Amino acid sequence: MDLTNTSFMKIRRQTTVLSSILIIASISSLFINKLNFGLDFTGGSLIEIRLDEEINSLEEIRSFLQSMELNDFQVNYFGSNKDISIKVPGGEASIDEDALIVNLKKSFNFEVRRQEFVGPQVGSELRDQGGLGLLAALAVMMVYIMFRFQYKFALGALLALVHDVVIVLGFFSIFSLDFDLSVLAAILAVIGYSLNDTIVVSDRVRENFRKKRRSEAEITINRSLSQMIGRTLITSLTTLLVLLALFIFGGETISNFSIALMVGVISGTYSSIYIVCNTLLSLNITSEDLMVKKTEVLDDGMP
């Protein structure tokens, strides 16, 4: 497939509509459905067990927990069909973990692999600190781009980063996936990945604007994207293959982490092309914006 002379910006209006729809859908879901915070943020109990023998379905354990008058809980496989995780969100008095294990052993033979409790106050602090860390990362990235390139590139980079973060958050909200610390770490990684793609694109755009000063902005941007699209697609594809392997073979523990990164990589590749470059065209980027400013020299030869 030859992409060396592709007019990427020819469909920039369509991609703007697509991005707007995705952003509106994500924000709407975040307001309506909100995020399904994991135990890291809500507090609660986590028990992971390994059964001696496989059971027919998780409904057996779910029915048993309901018979103990537990209604708000999650039961999932992680790893193999013998490995079961039981999550009960809530405050310090949510359940008696030891009593739950004793009652479970009356009906099932298993080994306890992990047992922990996260208090609601700790969860609240983690949620607040994680949100502040996310905002701080976005602010630092914007300042970095502004100093390295120019304010129009900084605005494009900021929009791309916000776009990627909102898309990942919206994906988890729409599909009601657990949002825990591993997903937050994945979002921070997505910010770095997206920024890397943005810098690659911005570097090539700036270089071509300085070489072809009389060329139209859209033509210059198309040329820049054509020159770096092969590298970008190969990098994204190999990253996605690794993440897919982690999702398939990594088990329940890192499945949501892998999903967040896969969505982020796809969104980051897309945004570095159509959000950043779209913003530059909308702000009427010209070669004059990227000219190297020369220091004026006075008559005595001193700058």
Image (cartoon, helix red, strand yellow):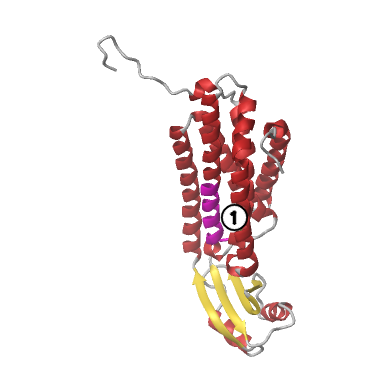
At 51% from the left and 25% from the top, the residue drawn is 210
Compared with 59, 118 (above or below) is above
Q: Quarter-wise, where is residue 280 in the image?
A: top right
Specify the segment rendered in magenta.
178-193
At 51% from the left and 35% from the top, the residue drawn is 203
Compared with 202, 168 (above or below) is below
At 62% from the left and 78% from the top, the residue drawn is 83
* Residue 179 colored in magenta in the image: yes
Residue 263 appearing in the image: yes
Residue 189 screen position, x and y as percent = 52, 52
Q: Quarter-wise, where is residue 271 in the image?
A: top right
Residue 275 appearing in the image: no
The residue indicated by pointer 1 is 239
Label 1: element kind = helix
| Amino acid identity at mark 1 | Thr
* Residue 89 colored in magenta in the image: no
Specify whether 148 is left or right of 218.
Answer: left
Residue 123 screen position, x and y as percent = 50, 62
Q: Quarter-wise, where is residue 50 in the image?
A: bottom right
Front residue (pair 276, 42): 276
Specify whether 164 is left or right of 134.
Answer: right
Quarter holding the N terminus is top right
Residue 136 screen position, x and y as percent = 46, 45
Compared with 218, 75 (above or below) is below
Q: Residues within 10 Å of mark 1 (few under 14, many from 20)?
A: some
